[in-house]
Image (cartoon, coloured by chain):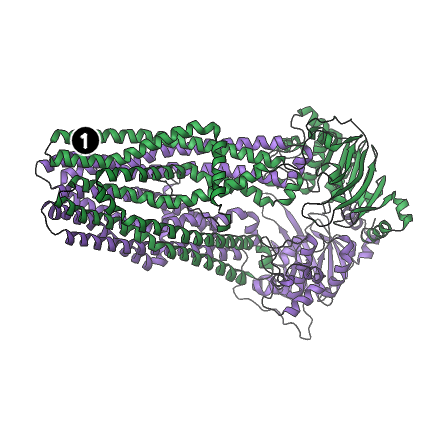
Amino acid sequence: MSKEPKGVTREGWRLLFATLKLQRRALIMGACVGLAWTLGKVAVPQLTKLAIDRGIEKNGSLLLWTMLILAAATIAGFFAGWRRYIAFRESRLTETMLRERIFAQIQGLHVGYHDKAQTGQLMSRSSSDLQQVQGFVVNIPIFVSQITMVIGVVVILFFSDPILAAVSLFPLPFINISARSFSHKIHPAVMAVQQEQAQLANIVEESVSGIRVIKGFGAEAVQQGKLNIEADDIRRESMRAARIRSRFLPAIDLLPSLGLVAVLGLGGHRVIDGHMTLGGLVAFNTYLTMLIWPMRNIGMTVAFGQRAASALLRVNEILSVVPAIADAVEPKKLPETGLAQPVGAVNFNNVSFGYDVGHLDLTVLNGLSLAIQPGESVAIVGATGSGKSTITRLLLRFYDPQSGNITLDGVDLRDLTLSDLRRAVGVVFEDTLLFNDTVSANVAFAKPGIEQEVIVRAAKLAGAHDFIMQLPQQYDTVLGERGFSLSGGQRQRIAIARAIVADSRVLVLDDATSAVDPTKEHEIRDALATVMRGRTTLVIAHRPATIELADRAVLLDNGVIAAVGTHQELLATNEKYREVLAAWSSPQVVE
Amino acid sequence: MWSGGGGRGGGRSGIDEDQKLDRSQTRVVLIRSIKMAGEFRRTAALAMVYVIITVLCTLAGPVLVRHGIDAGIKGKDARALDVTVIAYLVVVAIAYVIGRLQYVALNSAGEGFLRMLRMRVFGQMQRQSMAFFDREKAGVLVARMTADVESMSELVQYGLMQFLSSFLLLFFAFFLLMSMSWQLTLISLIVFPFLIAASVKFQRDSNRAYLEVREKVGANLSALQEGITGVRVIQAYAREDEQIRRFKESNRELFRSHLYSVKVSTWYFGLIEFAGIASSALIVGLGGYLVHRGTVSLGTVVAFVLLLASLFDPVQQLSQLYNTLQSAAAALHKLFGIIDAQPDVAESTSPTPLPDAGDVVVDNITFAYAGATKPALDNVSVKLSAGTRLALVGPTGAGKSTLAKLMARLYDPQTGSVSFGGVNLRDASMDDLRRRIVVIPQEGFLFDGTVRDNLLIAKPDATEAELLAALDRLGLRERFEALPEGLSTEVRERGSRLSAGERQLVALSRAALVDPAVLVLDEATSNLDPGTEMLIEAALERLMVGRSVIVVAHRLSTVQRADKIAVVADARISEIGTHDELIALNGHYALLAATWNKTQPH
C-alpha cells in the first residue's frame, strides 16, 4: 500500500471515483442522512448542559429538557439506522456490479489470456479485492457525517472555551495518527498470519489427498514435522500481530482519557472560579467522548480507501485487457444448412502457429495444409506434442494462426462472428468439464431449453442413458463440483451427448474416448459412427478402433502432414505411423 | 475494548442451528478445553488478573469525575480537585501498562493453545487408518484443521478478552451504581431489558441472515469458478451470454441476501443509538428531580451519565460474543471428535519382528468397507510365494484393489489373516511392515517441496548416497538430474512442473529407496507420452527384480508377465493359475483376454 508509487495510488483513487460516480445520487443521499444524524447527535450535549445548568442547578423545567433530549435521541437513532442501510446497500451494489463486469470480461477474454492467468488470481480479483472496495464504500456515509461532526464539535468547543478546548483536544489528533499507523502496521501482520495459515492448510490438504503415499511409506512423522513448523510459524506471526495490537490499541483507547482529565482539572478550576458552568463542563466532557470513535474511524477509513484503491487497480488490470480474439467488424455469414449444397468444408491453408511463451520458439504447426470435404471424417494421428490438439483450438478460433488461414465453407474464420463459428463447430474435449447443473442442462449445454426427448435421444446415442437412469434423480441429478461426481468415462459420454445436441456442421472429437473403459469402447464406437455419418468430423485418437471410424487418417509430424491414407493403408505402408500407434498402445506400465 | 478490524466486535461468525451444542455439551467442551490448556493456565490466570485491573480502571474514571465535581468543584476545594486529577492520571497510566500486558498474555495463552490443538488434531488424524480417510471427505478434514481452528483465533485475539472485560465491567458497574444511588440505578436499568431483548432478537435474525449470505456466497463463488475453469468449453459452445446471465442471477441473489441481512439488522443500530441517548435523558430528568429533592448529588448524576455511556458497548458485545463463543464451542466439539477417534488399524504393543523375506499368505479373509452392505472380499485365500508375481484381474469393483490393500495392511480383515513369512501382519510393527511391503498407488502423488524431499518421504533418514544408489538401481539418476535444478527442483503446486510420467518415476524411486521384499502395484489406466512410458517400464522391471509383486492389472501385457493370475469376481477369487491354464479353462479370464486382444493390438 504505502510502498506503491504515488502515481499508481492516484490512478487507483481515480478509478475508485469513476466507479462510484454511477451511484452518485444514492451516496449523496447517504451523506445527507448522515448530516441529519450529526445534527441530532451534536445537539445532545448542548441540551444536557442546559438541562443541568437551567433545569437542575436553577430549578427550571426538567421535563422540557428531558423531552428535548429524547427528541434528539429519536433523530439520531432514526438517521443512524437509515444511514447504515444506505451505506450497506450502496457498497454491496458497487461490489455486485463490479463482479458482473469482471465475470463478463473473463468470459469474453481469449484463451491465450486464460492460458497464462491463474484461476486463483482471477477468483481473488472478484472476491477478496472486491471486498476491499466494499469495505471502503460502506464507510463513506459514516465518514462524511463523522467529519462534519468533528468539525461541528471542535467549533462548538472553541466557541464555549477556547483555552480548555485547545488543551483537551490536544490528544485527539494522536488518536487519528495512531489509528492510521496501526492500520498500516497491522495489515501486513494479519496478511502474514493468513499466509502461514494458508501454508498449514496446504500441508493438511496434501497429507489428506496423499494419505495413500504417507500410509504406504509410514511417513506420518515427516508430515507431522512439516505441520509443527507451520503451527509454530502461525503462533509466531500471530504474536507479532498481537504485539502490534498491544502497542496501539490500549493507547488509542486511553488517549481520550487525557482530554477528559484536562477538562476535569482545568475546567474544574474554571467552574470554581465562576468562568464556566458545571453543565458546560459536563457538556465538554460528553463532546470529547463523542469525538473518540470518529477520530479512530477517520484514520481507518483513509487506510481502507488506500487498500480499496490498490484493489481496484488490480481489478482494472483484468477489465482493461482487450480480447485478442474478437468478432470481425463486418462479419460474413456461413452458407445455410439444408440446401442442396452440402456444408462443412474445412480448409487449412499453409497454417503456421506457435504458442506465445516468452522468448521460446515453440512452433507447433509449420505451414500445415489440409482440405476436408463436407461430410468427410478425418483422423489425426501424431506423437505427443505434434500439434493434434492445436488443430482443434485453431478451428475453434481459440487462437489465430500466425500465418496462413483456415476457412469453413469457404469463409475465413476471422470473417465470421465467434458465436456463428462456434455454433458451427462442435467439440468434445479430452478433459470433460461438467457444469454444476442437472444432467439435462449439461447435455443441452449448447441449446438451453431444448425438448427433453432430444436430450434423451442424444444420451442414448452416446451410450449415457443407462447410467443416467441409475443416478439418484436420473436426468435431474445435479452434476459438477457441488453435485454428483461421475467417472471419467461417464463424463466423456455426457460430453459426446452434448456434442450430439449441438448438432453442428463440423464435429471435433479431441481424444474423446480416452477415459472410456476399453471393454466398453465398442458401445461408444457405434454411437460415434452414427453421429459422424454425413457430418464433417475431425477425430483425434490413439486407439486404432477409434481411428478406424474415420474415412481417412493423416499423420502429423513436425507441424506438417507427413502422410495421408486410410488407417489400413498407413499401417501397411508407413513406418512412422506404425511407430506412433505402437508407442500409444504399448503395454501400459504399472503404477 | 476495541477490535481493530473494521468495526465494533470484530467479524461476524454465524452458526447453524443444527450445529449448536446444548448446554451440557457446551459445558463438557469448555471444561475439557480448560483441562487441555494445562500448561497455559498460569498465563491465562495472569491475563485474567490484568483484565480485572483494566476493568477497574475503566470504572474508576467516572467515579473520580464524580468525586472531583462533588468534593472539588461543588465544595470549592481546589486541592481536592487537583488530587482527583492526579489520581485520574495515575489510573490512566496503570490502565495503559496493564492493557498492553493483557493483550500479550491473553494472546500468548490463546495462540499457544491453538498451536497445541493444531498439532494434536493433525497427529491424531494421521494415525487413523485408511478406512477413516475413505469415510471422511477430504474437504471436511481440511476444514477441521483450518476453518474450525481459525474460527477460534478471533476469539483468542480479542474475543475472549472482550467477553471477559464486558462481563466484568457490567458486573462491577452494577455494584458501583448501586453503591452510588440505588434510585438512579433503577432508572438506568429501565432501558436494559429492552436492550437485551433487542440484542438477542438481533443476534438471532442476523445469524440467520448471515447463514443465508454464506450459502449464497458459496454458490456465487462456485459459479465464478465454473466460469473461469470452464471458459474454454463455454467459448467453444458460444455460451458466454447464457453463462453471464446465469452468473448475474446468482450474483443478484447474493446481493438480495446481503440486503436482507441489512434490513433485519438496521433497526437495531438505530435503536441502540436512541436508547443510549434516551437513557441519559432519563438520568438527567429523573436524576435532576432527585437532586432537587436532595436525594442524590449532582456529581452522582454526572457520573451516571458518563458510566452509562461506557455500559452500552459491553451489552451489545456480550450478545455478539456469545454467538462467537457458541461457534467456537461447536468447532472444538468437532475437533475433539477427531482427537477421540481410535485408529482401527492399531499397532501391536509387543510387535514380532518380520523376517527379511517370505511368502505372503492370505488366509480365508473376509472384509467389508464401513457402511457397505456386501463384503468386498468374501472368504478369500491366496498365497504369494517369495520372489514371484501375482496379477489380480477382474471387473471394476470386484475387490482386486481391496485385496491388494489388505495384503499391505492398509486395512485389517474382519476375519481371517494376512501373514508375511509366517508372521501375522497384525503382530508386526508398522515400521517393520512398511519396510517389507510397499504400496505404489496409481497416481504418483507429490508433496510440496523439492524432488529430493519427495523421494525422502519414503525414508527420511536416508543419506544422499543411499538416495543416489536407489536411483542408479532404477537407471533414473540421469533423468532426475536433467531437471532444471536436479533433485533440488521445486515441484510446485502438486507437481505441476513435473509431467505425469515423471511423477510416476518419483513413486517408483520412493519404493526403490525403501528396498522392500514385496511390492503392491495398482496399474495406471491413463495414457502417458511414449518416451516416458518406456522409461517407466524399464525402471519398473528393474524395481521388480528379486521381489514378490502383487499387481492390480488392467492390461494384457502386464498379466502375461505374471507367474500367476487370480481373477477376482464378486468378492471371491473365481479362477487362479497361469495364463495358459486359465485360457484352457475357457472361463472368465479367457473372455477378458479375448476382449483385450480386440481393443489392444500388439
| Quarter the N terminus of chain B occupies | top left
Residue B465: image quadrant is top right
Q: Which residue is mark 1?
A: B84
Residue A291: image quadrant is top left
Q: How many marks?
A: 1
Q: Residue at x 57, y 68 (%)?
A: A332
- Measured along the vertical axis of the image, is residue B342 above or below residue B213? above
- Does residue B512 appear anywhere in the picture? no
Q: Is residue A353 left or right of residue B279?
A: right
Q: Which hue belongs to chain A?
A: purple
Expressed as whole percent of the image width and height from the top left, the position of residue B530 reads 74, 44
Q: Nearer the viewer, residue B241 or A420?
A: B241
The residue most toward the right is B584
- Measured along the vertical axis of the image, is residue B322 above or below residue A433? above
Residue B260: image quadrant is bottom left
Q: Amino acid at mark 1?
A: Thr
- Measured along the vertical axis of the image, is residue B184 above or below residue A233? below
Q: Chain of mark 1?
A: B
Q: Is residue B507 left or right of residue B231?
A: right
Expressed as whole percent of the image width and height from the top left, the position of residue B479 reads 70, 34
Q: Which hue belongs to chain B?
A: green
Q: Secondary structure at mark 1?
A: helix
Mark 1 neighbour density, 10 Å: few (under 14) some (14–19) many (20 or more): many
